[in-house]
Amino acid sequence: MIFGYVRVSTSTQSAESQKSLIARYVVEHRWALDEWIEVEMSSRRTAGQRRLPELLAKVAAGDTVIVSELSRLGRSLREVLGLIEELIHQKRCRLILVKQGLDLDPQNHRDMTHKILLTIFAMLAELERDFVSKRTKEGLRSRREQGIVLGKPKGVVQPSMYDADRERILHLHALGVPLATIVDVHLKYGKYLSLKNYLAKLQRLPIRNATA
């Protein structure tokens, strides 16, 4: 049996690109795909909701599972590598990852070990960046859908250690006291450059905020 496993993270994504990639691979090798396991659900859901147990229950020794890319198998490196271990070493089925050009076949131990060493470990950093990027984008999309405005409002100064002495700093600066003197003599904390940047931000605010 040959299975095609497809998963998209949100309802706004389409599984067609993954299915097309898998279908082309099958046609090129003159195979026949027996069954699709297709899921449209976030990787933050449980393995059961992503139908991974269903996939593992259906495959048997000698079967082939084709996935468009490694990150479609899970939400973390540990989960992905654990699933690969179960599919290959416990179920004794073949796993093909199209985008990575990776064909893990338990019938060829030497070739499989070689590919794991040269390919999987070379992809770990790239895959982890992919997971982080996807989780970040999903989080930002969710916040936007909730009407949450991302980023700080224009013209707002981030909290600073100088805020408690803001009036004092502005007064001394207006009198022409050097910034280094304000830091070393009057405040006794902070640094020249950070105070300079703080004042520059204040000066970009409306006049009423800077002189209040």
Image (cartoon, rainbow, N blue to C red):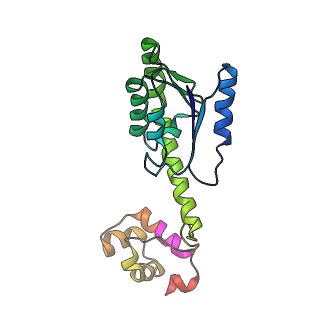
In the image, 193 versus 179, the foreground residue is 193
Task: Give me the residue at 63% from left, 28% from top.
Answer: 33
Percent coordinates x, y for residue 2 in the rendering: 57, 27
Q: Is residue 167 magenta?
A: no
Q: Is residue 144 left or right of residue 166?
A: right
Task: Give me the residue at 43% from left, 12% from top.
Answer: 110
Q: Residue 102 falls in which quadrant of the image? A: top right
Q: Main secondary structure of the magenta part?
A: helix
Q: How many marks?
A: 0
Task: Give me the residue at 35% from left, 66% from top.
Answer: 190
Quadrant position of the N terminus in the picture = top right
In the image, 25 versus 191, the foreground residue is 25
What residue range appears in magenta? 197-203
Q: Residue 143 falls in which quadrant of the image? A: bottom right
Percent coordinates x, y for residue 106 in the rendering: 44, 18
Task: Give me the residue at 55% from left, 70% from top.
Answer: 148
Please determine whether, in this image, residue 4 is positioned above or below residue 194. Answer: above
Percent coordinates x, y for residue 100 in the rendering: 56, 28
In the image, 118 versus 32, the foreground residue is 32
Percent coordinates x, y for residue 113 in the rendering: 42, 17
Q: Is residue 150 left or right of residue 167?
A: right
